[in-house]
C-alpha cells in the first residue's frame, strides 16, 4: 500500500523543523502498518483555513491520478481547519477509494469530519478573537499592532528580564522628511500622480519599492495612504476596518467598522507633521472631493458601473499595470502616467479598441466548430425542458384521473341515498381541482415543444450578428455588456512594433480557441495557451486577436 504524507505549519514564525517532526511521526505510523511511503506533500507557513495551498492542491491532483493508496497526516487539522474544505477533501478521497489516517485520530470517518471540523472552526474563531484582543491591548499602550508604517522603524529591544520587547516605534528621519515633502507638495497644488512620478524619477524608495498615486492619496474613509495616516500627527487609530475571506477565492476583503469601534490613542512622540500643514492638506482634499461631486462624479471609493464596455479589464502587456483612459478618447498604461516605471507609451483610441474586439469576437464566434457546439448545447437543454413538460403533463393526467374517480365515488354514494354535509365541501374542492388540472393540460398541449428545433444555426448567426446592435440599444446594452464582461477576465494590450496586439483572457477566450481558428486578413492562427500554476490549477485561456 502506497502512503502519501501531508504536513503543514501555519506561519513563518513557526520552526521549519515542524515539517520534519510531522514526517517522522507519520513515517512511524506507515512502518507500523506495513505500508510503503510514496511521497511527502508539505506546505510551509500557510494557514489551514485556506485550500489554496500548492502542496495540498498537488495532493488532490495526484489522488485523482492514482499516485497513492492512503493519505497520512499528523492530525486532521493539518489537512484543513475549514469545515467545508475538510468535508470536501474527505468526500474526494472516499470517491477515489483512498482512506485517510492520522497519528492523532486513526482512520478518519464521517464522525471525525463532523466533530473535528467543528472543533477546528471554533479554534480559528477563538484564535481570531484572542488575537484581536491582544492587538487592542498593544494599541492602547501606544504600540504597533503589526505592519510597518512608512516614516517609522519598529524597534526590537531586550528587556531587563531577558525577553524581547516588540511593537515600539521610532521615527525614521529620512522617511519622515519624504512624508513632509509629500504633504508640502500636495498642499502647494501638485497632484498625487505628479508627486509619485517625481519621487520615482529621483529614485526615492517607497513603501513597496516604487511610488504610485494611490500610495499617496489612499482612501480618506479608511485612513489609508500617506495623506490620510493620522499617525503622522501623533494620533494612532486602529480597527477602522476588518477583513473577511471570500470563500470562493480565499482572498481577504476589507469591510469598514463603525467609528464607535475604532481604538484611538495619542502618541505625541511619533508626530512627524505639524498641525498647520495637516489641516492645509485636509482642506485641499475636501475641496477636491467637493469639486468631483459637483462635476457629477460619484464619491471616491463608491462602487459604480463601468462607464465604457471594457473599463477596468484592460492590462498593459509590458508591465501588468492597468490600461486606463488618458484624455477623453484614448487608453494608455497607468504606470507610465502614475509611476513613470513602464516604457509602453503606446495608446489606442477607445472606439478602435472596442471595434477591434467586437469585430474579432463576431469573426470567431461564427466559426463552424462554435456553431456546432451552440446547436448541441441548445438542443440538449431544449430536449431536457421538453422532457420536463411531458413528465409534468403525465403527472397531471394521472392526478385528473384520480380526481374523476373520487367525484364518481361521491356521486354513486349520493345515488344510493348516502349524504353528509361534508360531502358537499369535498365535491366543491374536487371540482375546483379538476378545472385546474384540465386547464394545465390544455396549456401544456398548446405549448408542447418539439424534440428537434429547426434553424438553430441560423438563429445563432443572427444573435452574433446583432451583437453590436444590442450594445447600441439602450434597452439591451447593459445586459449585453454584462454578458460579455462576465466571460472575459482580462484584456491585455501588448506592444509589438508600432501598434498594440490585443489578448483576451477568460472563459470566452477558451470558447474562441476551440477550433484553432484562422483570423481574417491573413493574420496568424489563433494562439491559445494554458500554463500550470503550482497547486492552483490552470490559468484562463489566452486568445490573441
Image (cartoon, rainbow, N blue to C red):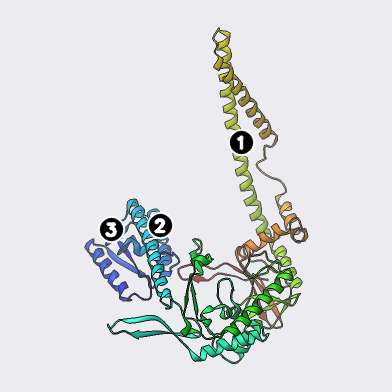
- Displayed quadrant of residue 129: bottom left
User: Could you tell me residue 466's position as x and y percent?
Assistant: 76, 58
Which residue is depicted at the point 57% across and 88% down? 180
Q: Residue at x 63, y 87 (%)?
A: 185
Crowd rating for badge 3 (residues with CA inside 10 Å; few <14, some 14–19, many 20+): some
Determine which quarter of the picture holds residue 153.
bottom left
Task: Tell me the quarter of the image containing the C terminus.
Answer: bottom right
- Measured from the top left, where is residue 357 in percent x and y? 71, 68
Residue 487 visible to an observer of this rendering: yes
- Quarter of the image containing the N terminus? bottom left
Q: Is residue 251 visible?
A: no
Q: Nearer the viewer, residue 350 or 184?
A: 184
Cα–Cα span, label 2 and label 1: 41 Å
Nearest the eye: 190 or 456: 190
Q: Secondary structure at mark 1?
A: helix
Is residue 140 rendered to the left or right of residue 437? Answer: left
Along the line of sight, the residue nearer the viewer: 290 or 274: 274
Q: Which mark is residue 83?
A: 2
Amino acid at each position: 500500500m502506497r502512503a502519501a504524507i501531508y504536513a503543514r505549519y501555519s506561519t513563518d514564525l513557526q520552526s521549519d523543523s515542524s515539517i520534519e517532526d510531522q514526517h517522522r511521526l507519520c513515517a512511524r505510523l506507515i512502518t507500523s502498518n506495513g505500508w510503503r511511503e510514496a511521497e511527502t506533500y508539505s506546505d510551509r507557513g500557510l494557514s489551514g483555513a485556506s485550500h489554496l495551498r500548492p502542496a495540498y492542491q498537488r495532493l488532490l491532483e495526484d489522488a485523482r491520478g492514482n499516485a497513492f493508496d492512503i493519505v497520512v497526516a499528523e492530525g486532521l487539522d493539518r489537512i484543513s481547519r475549514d469545515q467545508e474544505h475538510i468535508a470536501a477533501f474527505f468526500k474526494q478521497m472516499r470517491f477515489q477509494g483512498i482512506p485517510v489516517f492520522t497519528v492523532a485520530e486513526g482512520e478518519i470517518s464521517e464522525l471525525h469530519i463532523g466533530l473535528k471540523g467543528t472543533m477546528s472552526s471554533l479554534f480559528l474563531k477563538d484564535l481570531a478573537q484572542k488575537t484581536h484582543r491582544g492587538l487592542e491591548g498593544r494599541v492602547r499602550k501606544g504600540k504597533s499592532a503589526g505592519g510597518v508604517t512608512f516614516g517609522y522603524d519598529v524597534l526590537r529591544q531586550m528587556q531587563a528580564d531577558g525577553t524581547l520587547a516588540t511593537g515600539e516605534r521610532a521615527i525614521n528621519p529620512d522617511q519622515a522628511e519624504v512624508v513632509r515633502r509629500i504633504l508640502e507638495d500636495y498642499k502647494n497644488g501638485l497632484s498625487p500622480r505628479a508627486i509619485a512620478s517625481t519621487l520615482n524619477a529621483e529614485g526615492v524608495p517607497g513603501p513597496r519599492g516604487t511610488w504610485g498615486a494611490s500610495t499617496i492619496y489612499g482612501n480618506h474613509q479608511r485612513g489609508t495612504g500617506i495623506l490620510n495616516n493620522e499617525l503622522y500627527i501623533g494620533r494612532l487609530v486602529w480597527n477602522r476596518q476588518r477583513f473577511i475571506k471570500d470563500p470562493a477565492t480565499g482572498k481577504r476583503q476589507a469591510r469598514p467598522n463603525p467609528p464607535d469601534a475604532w481604538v484611538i490613542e495619542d502618541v505625541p512622540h511619533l508626530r512627524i507633521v505639524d498641525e498647520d500643514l495637516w489641516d492645509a492638506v485636509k482642506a485641499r482634499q475636501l475641496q477636491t472631493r467637493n469639486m468631483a461631486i459637483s462635476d457629477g462624479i460619484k464619491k471616491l471609493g463608491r462602487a459604480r458601473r463601468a462607464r465604457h464596455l471594457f473599463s477596468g479589464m484592460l492590462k498593459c502587456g509590458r508591465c501588468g499595470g492597468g490600461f486606463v483612459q488618458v484624455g477623453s478618447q484614448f487608453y494608455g498604461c497607468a504606470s507610465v502616467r502614475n509611476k513613470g516605471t513602464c516604457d509602453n507609451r503606446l495608446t489606442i483610441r477607445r472606439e478602435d479598441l472596442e471595434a477591434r474586439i467586437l469585430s474579432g469576437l463576431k469573426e470567431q464566434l461564427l466559426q463552424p466548430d462554435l456553431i456546432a457546439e451552440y446547436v448541441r448545447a441548445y438542443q440538449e437543454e431544449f430536449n431536457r425542458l421538453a422532457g420536463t413538460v411531458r413528465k409534468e403533463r403525465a403527472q397531471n393526467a394521472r392526478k385528473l384521473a384520480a380526481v374523476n374517480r373520487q367525484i364518481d365515488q361521491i356521486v354513486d354514494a349520493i345515488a344510493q341515498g348516502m349524504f353528509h354535509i361534508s360531502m358537499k365541501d369535498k365535491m366543491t374542492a374536487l371540482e375546483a381541482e379538476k378545472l385546474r388540472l384540465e386547464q394545465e393540460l390544455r396549456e401544456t398541449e398548446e405549448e408542447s415543444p418539439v424534440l428537434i428545433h429547426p434553424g438553430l444555426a441560423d438563429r445563432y448567426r443572427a444573435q452574433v450578428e446583432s451583437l453590436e446592435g444590442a450594445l447600441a440599444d439602450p434597452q439591451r446594452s447593459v445586459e449585453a455588456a454584462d454578458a460579455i464582461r462576465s466571460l472575459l477576465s482580462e484584456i491585455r494590450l501588448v506592444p509589438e512594433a508600432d501598434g498594440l496586439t490585443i489578448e483576451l483572457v477568460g472563459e470566452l477566450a477558451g470558447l474562441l480557441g476551440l477550433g484553432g481558428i484562422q483570423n481574417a486578413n491573413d493574420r496568424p492562427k489563433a494562439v491559445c495557451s494554458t500554463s500550470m500554476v503550482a497547486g492552483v490549477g490552470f490559468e484562463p485561456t489566452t486568445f490573441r486577436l
